[in-house]
C-alpha cells in the first residue's frame, strides 16, 4: 500500500535530489490545498473593503444552520472517548503488544499539555471569564452566580471536549499507522470504511480538507497571538494598535519561524518550547502567589465541581428556546477551532504516544491536560474576577474594549508589571514561532502523503502560507475573520471527525477480534491415511536433556 | 478466553504426516508461524530423509466423527533442523495464500511461573484419531536444560501426537513454546548420573521449548518475526 502511495508521489516528477532543496509532495493534495488557500488569500485582498461584512454574514449563516452539528459532534466524540476509556479496547497497545513507551510518564504529560496549550490560553485566559461575568446568557450579570457561571462556561470551552477531539484524532492516527502500518495521514483513519479507496480521490479529499482546516486553525492562533503581542507592545511602549503593525509583526515573526525551519533547528525549537512552557508556568505561579492565592485555591475545586455538575446541561445547550446568537462567537467558534486544530495536535500527540495502551492514552490525553488547563484558567480568570469583584475593578471594561490587552491589564495590577508583561510577550512570540514551525511540519506530513520526515522546502512554503493567511485575515476583518475562517473550514472537518469515530471503532473491533489463521485453496489430491496404528514408535533420546 | 484461543489457533495447527508411497503415516503436530508459509514442529518427530506433508483440520463447530480415512495434505520441505533445541522449521513447497493474526510470537521470558497456558494438537493421531484437542495448564517451572535450552514445564500430560504443537499464553493469546513431550525423569537422570533406575518414574508434567529458540531459527532463515 505504501508503494502505491510512493508511486503516486513520484508522479510529481520532482527529482529526488539531496539537501533541503527538493520536494516530496502528494501532487493532488499539495496543489489543490495550496490552490484553495491562495484563492482565498487573493479573494480577500481583492474585496478587502467588503470582506469584514462577508465574514460576519458567513459566520452567522454557518452558525445558524450548522451550530447544532458542531454541538452534536463534540458531544458524540466525548462520549465515544469515554467509552474507549472504559471499554474492551483499553488494553490494546499502540504500536503492538511489545511496544513500550518512549518517554517517561511525566515527560509525556508535559508534552501533551504543551501540544494543546498555546497562544489561545494566553489570549482567552483572562478575557473569557471577564466577558461571561459581564454578560452571559444564563444568569444575571455582575452577580456571584454569574462569576461562577463565567468560570463554568470557560471551563466548558477549554475542558474535556477539546481534549476528547484531540484524543480521537491522535488515537486514529496512532492506531492505524503504528498498529496497521498505514501512512501517517488523516486519510489513513478511514481505511476500515473505504479500504484501498483511501489512496484514490476519497482519500485526497479527506487530506485536502485536513490540510485546509489545519492551516486555518494554525493561522487563527497566529492571528490571535499577533494581536496580543501588538497589544502588549502598545501597553508597554505605546506604539499603537493597527492591522498594519500586526501584519508587520507577523512578517517579522514568520521570518524567524522560517529561518528556524530552513536551519533545521528542530532540536533547538523543542528546547525553546520546553523553556517556554517553564516560563509560562512561572508566570502562572507568579500570579498565583502574588494574586489572591487563597481565593484561587478555593475556586479551583469549586469550579471543577460546578463544571461537572452542569456539564450535561451546558454542553448540550443550543439556544433553542432563547433564539439568541450568543453561541456564534463563542461555543460554535471554539468547537470548530478545536476541530480545525485537531490534525495538528493529534499528529503531535500520536507521535509521542507510541507504546501506551489505549486506556493509558485516553486517561493521559483527556484528563491530565484538562486539569492543567483548568488550573491555568482558574489562576488567571479568578484573579481577574477577584480584582473585578473585590478589588480595584476596571478589567471587564478594558476587556470589552480590547480583548488582546486583558492579560497585560491584569499583570498591571501586580508588582514588576513591565517585567512580567515583557515575559508574557516573549512567551507569546515563542508560542507563535513553535506553532508555526510544528504546524507547517504537520501540514507537510499530510501533503507529502504521510512521509514522517518530509523535505524542508515544502515545509517552508507552508510556514510562509500560515503567516500569509493570518495576515490576510487580520486585514480582512480581524477577530471576526479569524473566527469565520475557522468555522468554515471546521464544518466539513466536523463530518470527518464523526466518520472517524465510526471508522476507528470498526478498525479496533477488527483488530481485537480473534483473527483466525486461514489458508488458501485446499489441494485436490486426497491421500489415504495408513490405518494401522503406529504403536511401536520410538523417538529416541533427545539431545536437549 | 480458551474458546478465543481455540478459534484463533485451530487454523494454525496441522497434522504432520510422513508420505510413504501413496499412503500417509501420522508423525505429530506442526503449526503455522510465519505468513511466508513457515511452520514449526519438534525435530524429534522427523528425520531429514522423510517426505513430509501437513493437513489442516476441518473448521467446524459441530461434533466431529472419530474416524478420518483420507486427507488433502500440502507437501512441505524441511528448511532448518535443530536437534539441540529439538526444533524444526518447515515450509510449504508450493506458494500458498495464507493470512494469520499479527504478533503471534509471545514474550516467553516475561511469562511468570503459574501463568495459565493452553496447548493445542492432535494427541491421539498415532492411534488414528485425528480430533484436535485443546488443553489448559499452568507453567509449573521455567528451567534450563543440560544444553542451556529454555524449557517450560507445565502440569498437563501430553500425548505423543501433541508433540510439535504450540504452547499458548492464555492472557495474550500468543505462542510461548513448542510442545516437546512428557517430562521423563529417566532421560534426565541418565544425563546427569548415568543409568540409575530400570523402573520408569511417572510424572504428570510435560515440557515445551521456549519459542525464543524457534525465533532464532526463523531469523537464521532471514525472516522478519513480528
Image: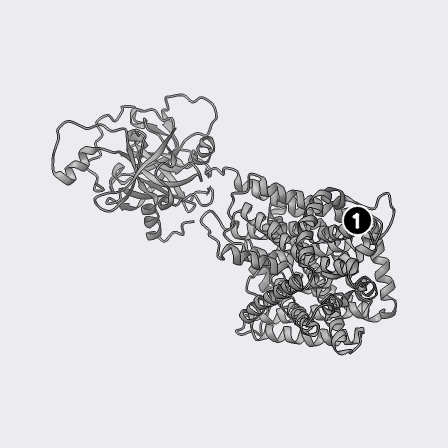
User: For the point 77% across and 50% down, which residue is it?
Assistant: A149
Q: Which residue is mark 1?
A: A145
Is residue A83 something that shows in the picture?
A: yes
Graded by Cα atoms within 10 Å as few (under 14), some (14 to 19) or many (20 or more), the crowding at tag 1 reads few
- Residue B115 lies in what quarter of the image? top left
Is there any visible trace of residue A199 in the rendered image? no
Question: Camera-side residue: A497 or B139?
Answer: B139
Q: Is residue A397 above or below residue B51?
A: below
Q: Is residue A145 left or right of residue A349?
A: right
The residue that appears at 75% across and 69% down in the rendered structure is: A227
Q: Which quadrant does the C terminus of chain A fall into?
A: top left
Chain at tag 1:
A
Between A113 and A506, the residue placed more toward the observer is A113
**Side of A196 relative to A533 (left or right):** right
Is B150 displayed left or right of A158 in the figure? left
Is B87 placed above or below B133 here? below
Please name whichever residue, A522 or B32, is drawn nearer the observer in this view of the structure.
B32
| Snapshot colouring | one colour
Q: Is residue A459 left or right of residue B14?
A: right
For the residue pair B7 and A198, the one nearer the viewer reads as B7
Question: Residue A384: where, in percent of width, then height?
Answer: 74, 60
Q: Can you tell which quarter of the image residue B95 is in?
A: top left
Residue at 76% x, 42% y: name it.
Answer: A313
* Residue B70 locus on image (x, y percent): 37, 27
Residue B119 x %, y %: 37, 33
How many discs appear?
1
Secondary structure of residue under mark 1: helix
What is the x, y in percent for residue B153? 30, 36
Amino acid at each position: 500500500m505504501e508503494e502505491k502511495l510512493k508511486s503516486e508521489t513520484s508522479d510529481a516528477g520532482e527529482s529526488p535530489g539531496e539537501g533541503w532543496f527538493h520536494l516530496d509532495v502528494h501532487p493532488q493534495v499539495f496543489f489543490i490545498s495550496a490552490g484553495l488557500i491562495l484563492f482565498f488569500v487573493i479573494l480577500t485582498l481583492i474585496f478587502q473593503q467588503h470582506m469584514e461584512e462577508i465574514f460576519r454574514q458567513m459566520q452567522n449563516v454557518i452558525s445558524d444552520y450548522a451550530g447544532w452539528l458542531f454541538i452534536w459532534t463534540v458531544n458524540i466524540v466525548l462520549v465515544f472517548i469515554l467509552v474507549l476509556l472504559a471499554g474492551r479496547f483499553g488494553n490494546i497497545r499502540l504500536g503492538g503488544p511489545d511496544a513500550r513507551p518512549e518517554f517517561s510518564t511525566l515527560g509525556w504529560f508535559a508534552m501533551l499539555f504543551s501540544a494543546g496549550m498555546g497562544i489561545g490560553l494566553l489570549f482567552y485566559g483572562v478575557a473569557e471569564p471577564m466577558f461571561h461575568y459581564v454578560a452571559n446568557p444564563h444568569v444575571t450579570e455582575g452577580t456571584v452566580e454569574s462569576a461562577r457561571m463565567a468560570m463554568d462556561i470557560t471551563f466548558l470551552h477549554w475542558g474535556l471536549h477539546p481534549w476528547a477531539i484531540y484524543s480521537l484524532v491522535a488515537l486514529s492516527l496512532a492506531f492505524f499507522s503504528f498498529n496497521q502500518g498505514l501512512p501517517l495521514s488523516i486519510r489513513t483513519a478511514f481505511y476500515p470504511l473505504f479500504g484501498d479507496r483511501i489512496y484514490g480521490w476519497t482519500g485526497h479529499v479527506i487530506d485536502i480538507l485536513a490540510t485546509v482546516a489545519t492551516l486555518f486553525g494554525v493561522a487563527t492562533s497566529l492571528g490571535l497571538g499577533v494581536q496580543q503581542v501588538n497589544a502588549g507592545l502598545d501597553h508597554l511602549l505605546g506604539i499603537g494598535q493597527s492591522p498594519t503593525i500586526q501584519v508587520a509583526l507577523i512578517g517579522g515573526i514568520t521570518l524567524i519561524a522560517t529561518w528556524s525551519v530552513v536551519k533545521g533547528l528542530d532540536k533547538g525549537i523543542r528546547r525553546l518550547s520546553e523553556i517556554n512552557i517553564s516560563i509560562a508556568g512561572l508566570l502562572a505561579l507568579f500570579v498565583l502567589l502574588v494574586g489572591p492565592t487563597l481565593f484561587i485555591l478555593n475556586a479551583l475545586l469549586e469550579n471543577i465541581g460546578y463544571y461537572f455538575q452542569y456539564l450535561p446541561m451546558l454542553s448540550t445547550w443550543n439556544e433553542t428556546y432563547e433564539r439568541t446568537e450568543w453561541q456564534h462567537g463563542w461555543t460554535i467558534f471554539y468547537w470548530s477551532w478545536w476541530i480545525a486544530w485537531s490534525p495538528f495536535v493529534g499528529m503531535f500527540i500520536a507521535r509521542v504516544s507510541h507504546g501506551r495502551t489505549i486506556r493509558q492514552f485516553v486517561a493521559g490525553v483527556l484528563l491530565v491536560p484538562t486539569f492543567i488547563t483548568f488550573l491555568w484558567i482558574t489562576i488567571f480568570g479568578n484573579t481577574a474576577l477577584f480584582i473585578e469583584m473585590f478589588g480595584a475593578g476596571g478589567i471587564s471594561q478594558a476587556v470589552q474594549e480590547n480583548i488582546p490587552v486583558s492579560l497585560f491589564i491584569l499583570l498591571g495590577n501586580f508588582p514588576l508589571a513591565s517585567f512580567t508583561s515583557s515575559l508574557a510577550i516573549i512567551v507569546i512570540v515563542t508560542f507563535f514561532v513553535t506553532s508555526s514551525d510544528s504546524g507547517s511540519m504537520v501540514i507537510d506530513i499530510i501533503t507529502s502523503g504521510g512521509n514522517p520526515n518530509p523535505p524542508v522546502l515544502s515545509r517552508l512554503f507552508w510556514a510562509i502560507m500560515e503567516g500569509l493567511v493570518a495576515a490576510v485575515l487580520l486585514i480582512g476583518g480581524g477577530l471576526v475573520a479569524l473566527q469565520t475562517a475557522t468555522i468554515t473550514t471546521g464544518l466539513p472537518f466536523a463530518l470527518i471527525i464523526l466518520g472517524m469515530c465510526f471508522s476507528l471503532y470498526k478498525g479496533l473491533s477488527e483488530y481485537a477480534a480473534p483473527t483466525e489463521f486461514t489458508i488458501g485453496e485446499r489441494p485436490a489430491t486426497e491421500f489415504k491415511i495408513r490405518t494401522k496404528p503406529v504403536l511401536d514408535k520410538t523417538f529416541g533420546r533427545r539431545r536437549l536433556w | 478466553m480458551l474458546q478465543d484461543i481455540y478459534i484463533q489457533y485451530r487454523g494454525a495447527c496441522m497434522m504432520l504426516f510422513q508420505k510413504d508411497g501413496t499412503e500417509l503415516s501420522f508423525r505429530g503436530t506442526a503449526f503455522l508461524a510465519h505468513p511466508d508459509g513457515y511452520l514449526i514442529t519438534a525435530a524429534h518427530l522427523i528425520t531429514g530423509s522423510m517426505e513430509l506433508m501437513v493437513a489442516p483440520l476441518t473448521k467446524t463447530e459441530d461434533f466431529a466423527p472419530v474416524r478420518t480415512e483420507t486427507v488433502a495434505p500440502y507437501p512441505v520441505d524441511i528448511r532448518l533442523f535443530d536437534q539441540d533445541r529439538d526444533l524444526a522449521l518447515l515450509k510449504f513447497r508450493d506458494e500458498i495464500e495464507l493470512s494469520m493474526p499479527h504478533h503471534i510470537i509471545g514474550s516467553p521470558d516475561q511469562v511468570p511461573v503459574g501463568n495459565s497456558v493452553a496447548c493445542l494438537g492432535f494427541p491421539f493421531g498415532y492411534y488414528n484419531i485425528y480430533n484436535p484437542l485443546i488443553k489448559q495448564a499452568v507453567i509449573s517451572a521455567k528451567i534450563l536444560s543440560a544444553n542451556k535450552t529454555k524449557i517450560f514445564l507445565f502440569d498437563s500430560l501430553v500425548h505423543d501426537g501433541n508433540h510439535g504443537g504450540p504452547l499458548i499464553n492464555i492472557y495474550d493469546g500468543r505462542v510461548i513454546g513448542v510442545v516437546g513431550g512428557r517430562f521423563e525423569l529417566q532421560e534426565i537422570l541418565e544425563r546427569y548420573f548415568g543409568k540409575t533406575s530400570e523402573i520408569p518414574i511417572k510424572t504428570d508434567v510435560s515440557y515445551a521449548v521456549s519459542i525464543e529458540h524457534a525465533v532464532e531459527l526463523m531469523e537464521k532463515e532471514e525472516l522478519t518475526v513480528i
